[in-house]
Amino acid sequence: MLDKTNPWRVWILSLLIAIMPLSFALPVKAKAIPALILFLTGLWVLATRADVRRAYRRAAPVLVPAAIAFVFWAVNVGAHGVNWREFDVTSHILAFLVIAATFALPLRTAALRVGFSGSAGVLGLICVEQHYIEHIDRAYGINNGEWGAIEFGMFMLVLSLIAIVQALRGELRSRERAMHAVFAVMGFYGALLTQSRGPLLAFVPVFAALMLIQGRRTGRWRQSVLALVIGVAAAGLAATTLHGEMVERLAAVKDEVATYSEQDATGAVRERLEMWRTARMAVIAHPVTGVGMNQFGPFARARIADGEVNPSVVRYDHPHSEYLEWAATGGIPGLLVLVLLFGGSLIYFGRHALNRDNAIAMPACAGFSTTAMYALCALTDNVFYRAMPHSLYFFLTLGLAVYVGRALDRHRTGAGAS
């Protein structure tokens, strides 16, 4: 159906994949059309191409945990008698498991590089417009409400890290590398305008890990360490001089943690601590089955009515920790599934990120940074409960896993990577 003798089809497919990350952040109903085309294409090539199925087998450490998560939550919803509408966002995993097949086809990688990096730049400009023209203190994008600033900040930082990965590719022309670097800066600055502490703190160790990976695989330790120092210093300077609000928000964490009690649980950090205490209560009460998908809110409100939980968290439906979310609503088995989901992806991408072939290492670095950002942000926020960040994670990790699997297969057979 798709091969190199039909270049226009290759370009269309590449462009459809390239615009997907940006489409997740835009409130445009037509964005379902590219996803549908990719889904149908994925079904077709899975049924007709043995090389695509081989790529799936190689990507099993990432694909299998995602499939397990899909089945686990379907069983959880059915067993608890929860309304099936609660399964809506999670059900998209199945679609992305199929869409991932399109990453194994011949693609114009330049289109993918520019599309993913450019998405960070576009979203960064949206944040600049919101902050400086609309005078919104915490930018939150156009597919969110004010409560969506944290997820939006993480979303942009993931794309910024992918742009950084492209800027590190020595085989690219200097002009293209500079373009990716500009997009990365725009995305990072937009994320800074969201004033989201968790994603910005998670960005630093992930960026450092990418620099160390590059130093290890290329042997250019001086260049990698210099890039790390300059990047961290620039980020710190921007946070402290351009937007002092971030410093104030970070400084408030220590005070709120020190003064938190079950009686005094008002404030962003104190409320998190109270929600985490409530989530632990749910795990203790239902260690095997959990309270049911998306049922943390009803559980918390029932405990508030009983006087066991502070009323300050009555408005929350999720505990602001993906790990505690899966443990509270799915029991200990749910937490293990989440650890498998992140762990399998980190090991798979981390191992191949050190490959000396850029066609394998660069997409592996992008997959590694995406997973690492989500895994760290999940400590203090829910990263999967809304469609936008949920879609970005599974689209990128599943697709890039298959892309790497196909590149490994071609490398083994001597055909070369696409």
Image (cartoon, rainbow, N blue to C red):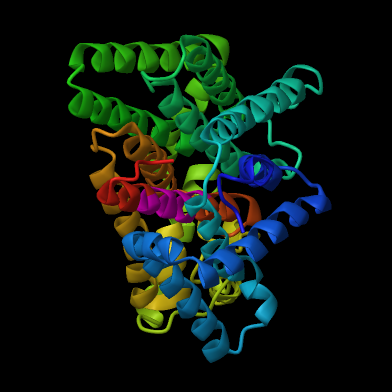
Nearest the eye: 346 or 379: 346
Up-down relation of residue 207 to residue 97 (above or below)? above
Residue occupying the point 58% across, 71% down: 294
Rendered image quadrant of residue 53: bottom left
Residue occupying the point 44% across, 76% down: 330
Please say whether residue 20 is one of the residues in the magenta stretch.
no
Left or right: where 156 falls relative to 61: right
Up-down relation of residue 276 to residue 331 (above or below)? above
**Residue 196: image location, x then y, percent:** 54, 34
**Residue 302: image location, x then y, percent:** 58, 77
Left or right: where 55 falls relative to 111: left
The kind of secondary structure the magenta stretch mainly shows is helix
Left or right: where 289 falls relative to 226: right
Up-down relation of residue 1 to residue 299 (above or below)? above
Nearest the eye: 129 or 40: 40
In this orientation, does residue 409 appear?
A: yes
Left or right: where 146 falls relative to 252: right
**Residue 276: image location, x then y, percent:** 43, 59
Rendered image quadrant of residue 253: top left
In this orientation, does residue 384 appear?
A: no
Which quadrant would the C terminus be assigned to in this image? Answer: top left
Q: How many marks?
A: 0
Which quadrant would the N terminus be assigned to in this image? Answer: bottom right
Please provide the residue range marked out in magenta: 396-406
Residue occupying the point 77% across, 55% down: 33
Rendered image quadrant of residue 90: bottom right
